[in-house]
Image (cartoon, rainbow, N blue to C red):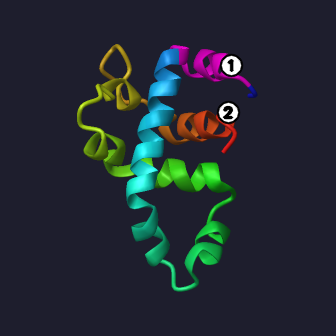
Amino acid sequence: MRTIQEVAKKFDITPGQASQLYNAMSITWGTIYSDIMNCFEGGEDEAYSAYSDEAEMVAENTLDADRVTTFCPDQDLKWVYRLEDGSYRMDIMEMGEAIWRTHGR
């Protein structure tokens, strides 16, 4: 998927929500980046080699354990984890990766 509109359509969200999530992931990643890198003895090289690409690394480390809601408490991000019917979203990581890739990271 190359455009934010394609990502939004695939995950049944709005382009605005996709941008909101990208911004929340960026803020969160900027806050936790050093801590994540310090978890790897080999630093950045080892960290990057542990994932298929940067989008996977960022999505896993920002969306897992609701970190985006922790580091962006002023944003309403309930939709990231729950669908309109109240059920859990099952494609959170895939959605986060697609959004990160679309923004050229």
Earlier in the chain: of badge 1 and badge 2, it is 1
Q: In the displayed structure, does residue 67 sit left or right of residue 60? A: left
Q: Residue furthest bottom?
A: 41
Q: Quadrant of the N terminus?
A: top right
**x and y, in percent, of residue 52 in the image:** 69, 58
On the question of residue 91 being in view, the answer is yes
Residue at 45% x, 27% y is: 20
Residue at mark 2 = 102
Q: Relative to 68, is 75 above or below?
A: above
Q: Secondary structure at mark 1?
A: helix
Q: Relative to 95, is 38 above or below?
A: below
- Tell me whether the residue at label 1 lies in contact with that at label 2, contact meaning CB atoms closer than 8 angstroms: yes
Q: Which amino acid lies under the numbered mark 2 shown in the image of this protein?
A: Thr
Residue 26: within the magenta?
no
Residue at mark 1 = 6
Q: Give the magenta part as a residue range.
A: 3-15
Residue 7: within the magenta?
yes
**x and y, in percent, of residue 71 in the image:** 30, 46
Q: Which amino acid lies under the numbered mark 1 shown in the image of this protein?
A: Glu
Q: Relative to 88, is 40 above or below?
A: below
Residue at 41% x, 45% y is: 27
On the question of residue 90 being in view, the answer is no
**What distance separates the C-alpha of mark 1 from that of mark 2?**
9 Å
Residue at 60% x, 51% y is: 56
- Magenta stretch: helix, strand or loop mostly: helix
Instruction: Count up the numbered dots.
Output: 2
